[in-house]
Image: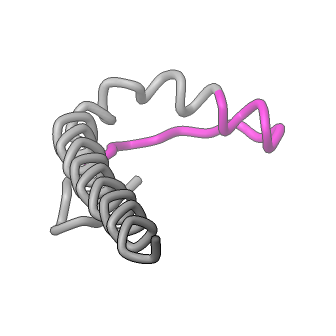
Amino acid sequence: MFESAYRALGNFLWRTLIALIVLVAVVVSLATALVPLLPAINTSLVAEIESRTGFDAQVAGITAEMEGFRPKLAL
């Protein structure tokens, strides 16, 4: 009885671990592909900053890149 419970728990944990690894790989791949596209949203970013602060905003440039698992964004 305990053997089947341990086997079921082991299968569940193993499948969950594999699913989490695949999910992390997909998220990192999407971030790597989408982060360089951030400069294309310059006008919408300026509009959002202006609407939230009430001040005139100007973004001279946006650079974005992935450094390992962390995105780096500079305005």
The vertical placement of 73 against 42, above or below, is below
Residue 57 falls in image quadrant:
top right
Closest to the observer: 74 or 66?
66
The vertical placement of 25 against 11, above or below, is above
Closest to the observer: 72 or 23?
23
Residue 72 in view (yes/no): no
Residue 11 falls in image quadrant:
bottom left
Residue appearing at x 41%, y 53% in the figure: 75
Residue appearing at x 77%, y 41% in the figure: 55
Residue range (magenta): 48-64
Residue 48 falls in image quadrant:
top right
Could you tell me residue 62's position as x and y percent? 33, 45
Could you tell me residue 42's position as x and y percent? 42, 29
- Residue 44 forms part of the magenta stretch: no
Closest to the observer: 33 or 74?
33
Tell me how many marks there are: 0
Query: Please, which residue is most extreme toward the right here?
Result: 54
- In the drawing, does residue 67 fall left or right of residue 71? left
- Residue 57 forms part of the magenta stretch: yes
The vertical placement of 47 against 19, above or below, is above
Residue appearing at x 29%, y 66% in the figure: 70
